[in-house]
Image: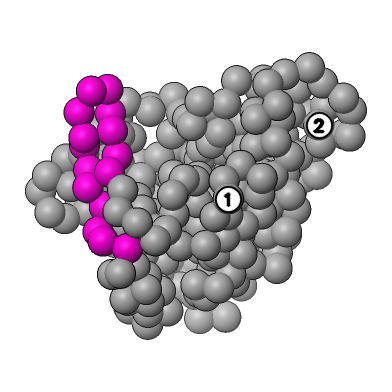
Amino acid sequence: MSKPATELRKKNRIKTIQSSLEIEGNTLSIEQITALIENKRIIGPKKDILEVKNAIAVYDYIEKLNPHKLDSFCEAHGILMKDLIESAGSLRNKSVGIIKGSEVSHIAPPSEMLNLLLNNLFDYLKKDDDLILIKSCVFHYEIEFIHPFIDGNGRMGRLWQTLILKEAYPVFEFLPIETLIKERQEQYYESLKKSDNSGESTLFIEFKLEIILDSLEELLKIKNVSLTNIDRIALFKSLVKIDSFTRKEYLLNFIEISTATASRDLKFAVENGLIEKSGDKNTARYKYK
């Protein structure tokens, strides 16, 4: 599956790094991060520069990470938090709480439970029949809840959700999901808090699915994006909210392609078992399997 054009990929990666780190208090701008990617020197807080360099390194390494392996998860944390904390890449060995303002908003599970909880979470990721979109959201929430590391849990949750999604749909690697989270940061933390209070992740999942939908719609608005037929079929599946659809309804979401191209997309998807077709010609309707 191909990915968006090179400039768009670069732009969205920079936005992803800047937004994810700004949520954690980093002060560097998009222009400064762009300069660091281009190996230029900048002036800024030493810690902020190191955070960005580490984030660039982990995103450069992303193709070598396995979203289904705990060892890979810890390896990514080691890159992301290198020289920022002593225990980079290692699970915490003490109890921690999350403080918001003057209140303790969350007490994480005891450190002796971490291996069990994380192994169960990775088993869920590998074996459960839930949709990838749902599993990625559950994983993100559980990492926030389990809080496996002393620091860097938020950025790891966001990174790993991207990794999970991009394995199924490579275009997700370059969607501005973190940018939309940053813009709705208060809602992000509120959905985490409400999910904690309710004892289930439903509210957080709903929030993240809304973010994903909005980021997909943003991508579809951008002209001259080099999406393949498989990209379009995958994106439309994420957007469609009806049981079945017509070629015309499919075409409305991809105004840059012709009717003939839409027909070829749908023919390809039918022949490869991605969708089912009923009816013929102008009466044809399609449904995802």
Which SS does the magenta portion mostly show? strand
- Counting other residues with Cα less than 10 Å from the Cα at mark 2, is it few (<14), some (14-19), or many (20 or more)? some
Q: Which residue was labeled with disc 2?
A: 36
Dot 2: what SS?
helix
The magenta segment: 97-111
Which quadrant of the figure contains the N terminus? bottom right
Rendering coords of residue 24 (x, y %): 48, 32
> Based on the displayed image, in which of its 4 quarters is residue 33 positioned?
top right
Rendering coords of residue 85 (x, y %): 57, 46
Above-or-below relation of 166 to 184 = below
Task: Please indicate whether residue 212 sits to the left or right of residue 20 in the image.
Answer: left
> Can the viewer see residue 273 in this picture?
yes
Q: Which residue was labeled with disc 1?
A: 86
> Based on the displayed image, in which of its 4 quarters is residue 222 positioned?
top right
Rendering coords of residue 135 (x, y %): 36, 64
Residue at (22%, 47%) from the top-left corner?
107
Which quadrant of the figure contains the C terminus? bottom left
As drawn, the residue found furthest toward the top would be 43
Q: Amino acid at mark 2?
A: Leu
> Can the viewer see residue 248 in this picture?
no
Between 127 and 155, the one nearer to me in the picture:
155
Rendering coords of residue 153 (x, y %): 44, 49
Residue 58 located within the stretch drawn in magenta: no
Q: Pointers 2 and 1 in contact (CB under 8 A)?
A: no
Above-or-below relation of 82 to 284 = above
Dot 1: what SS?
loop
Residue 107 located within the stretch drawn in magenta: yes
Between 140 and 12, the one nearer to me in the picture:
140
Residue at (44%, 54%) from the top-left corner?
149
Q: Amino acid at mark 1?
A: Glu
As drawn, the residue found furthest toward the left would be 198
- Counting other residues with Cα less than 10 Å from the Cα at mark 1, is it few (<14), some (14-19), or many (20 or more)? few
